[in-house]
Image (cartoon, rainbow, N blue to C red):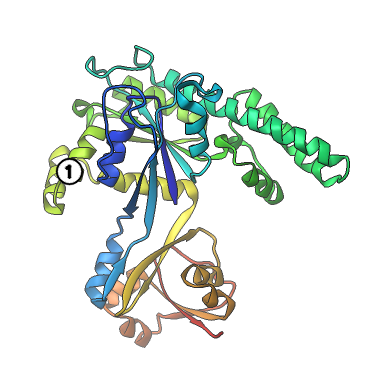
Amino acid sequence: MKLGIIGLPNVGKSTLFNAITKAGAEAANYPFCTIEPNVGMVSVPDERLDKLTEMYHPEKTTPTVIEFVDIAGLVHGASRGEGLGNKFLSQIREVDAIVHVVRCFEDENIVHVEDSIDPVRDMETINLELIFSDLESLEKRMDRARKLQKADKKYQVELDLMERIKESLEKGIPSRNLSFTEEESHLVDQMFLLTSRPVIYAANIAEEDIGKRPEDLPMVKAVMDQAEKENAEVLIICAKIEEEIAQLEPDEKNAFLQELGIPESGLDRLVKHCYHLLGLISFLTAGPKEVRAWTIQNGTKAPQAAGKIHSDFEKGFIRAEIVPYDTLIHLGSYQAARENGLVRSEGKDYIMKDGDVVLFRFNV
């Protein structure tokens, strides 16, 4: 999973990136501090792996990972190349989802590119640039499809689809808010539209606002109202505090979170939001060699899940031996689950569940 962190300059993108990845990306008080995108690989927090590691004492434990990309600050006119905009926009086409950081705090010591704080205006500025870029990209594809359509009528289907998307974009509606058939979705994926990427708005609040209700924070409430219109999700976060949390040892971190009245870190919450947004789940494999988490799309069948481990597992799939994680932990061992008849044998049509601990049987 690859997530792009975007937003206007000086809204806290690099600070949040540092907090999430501990990568030490430069965060400074001037526009375009980030020129080349910073990239960081982050292990997905999963306490189930810790429990299975205690149970199996494996040679290694391997969590699933998320790649975060800190994309430079976009500005008004980015789709026309303002502020190196075309370069930055192209980087967004490569991500699975967008974390759009929106500044929801006043601080006279941190400049704002628009000289005032207005989160909804900032959201609209970025969204319009993504729309303008997609319109330009669509026009080029439509010109090409019109030429090819004269020799091959199949391009008429693509033309009709692009015309529908174009009409939507011209009304300010991102392509992710449209409904498509399975065939249309495949075509849309090949268009690499910026507005087709699912979005989480990260409302970046001041330290003194931590623990307050969203309805008591006018700027956060405005972000939530706007996101609701777009069917987008909102994560309320204080990037500055998250950066401090990232420097702490696990025990110190838990104590600090309790002191702040925060049940879990911003990274943990962000991962959950992203999994939900992208329709992802994790299954687990466990043994003396390795305990590991594997990320798949919700709805994936057992052979395709096996293929995540190795293509031979999918080709020669025989069955999947499955015990739910909670059952395994309750009984204390795989052997106990088997003795109690709680290890299920599932075939090719089985749809994987989050937390399935699985052993794939295959023959090549």
Q: Looking at the rendering, in which quadrant would you find the C terminus?
A: bottom right
- Locate residue 100: give its quadrant: top left
Q: Is residue 136 positioned above or below 272 on the image?
A: above
Asked if residue 98 can be seen in this view, the reply is yes
Q: How many marks?
A: 1
Label 1's element? helix
Q: Is residue 238 visible?
A: no
| Residue depicted at x 54% and y 77% | 312
Q: Residue furthest right?
A: 151
State the image quarter where residue 217 is shown.
top left
For label 1, the residue is: 257
Residue placed most toward the observer, 291 or 10 = 10
What percent of the width, then of the height, locates residue 253? 15, 47
Viewer-nearest residue: 86 or 138: 86
| Three-letter amino acid code at the position of disc 1 | Leu
Q: Residue 179: image x %, image y %?
A: 65, 41
Q: Position of residue 45 (x, y in %)?
A: 30, 55
Using the image, determine if residue 230 lies above or below residue 179. above
Residue shown at the point (49%, 27%) measured from the top left: 85
Crowd tier of the residue under label 1, counting other residues whose Cα lies within 10 Å: few below 14, some 14–19, many 20 or above: some
Q: Position of residue 118 (x, y in %)?
A: 38, 17
Residue depicted at 46% across the width and 30% down the height: 227
**Farthest residue in the bottom direction?**
339
33 or 110, nearer to the observer:
33
In the displayed structure image, the side of residue 280 where residue 261 appears, left or right: left
Which quadrant would residue 36 be assigned to in this image?
Answer: top left
State left or right for residue 215 relative to residue 298: left
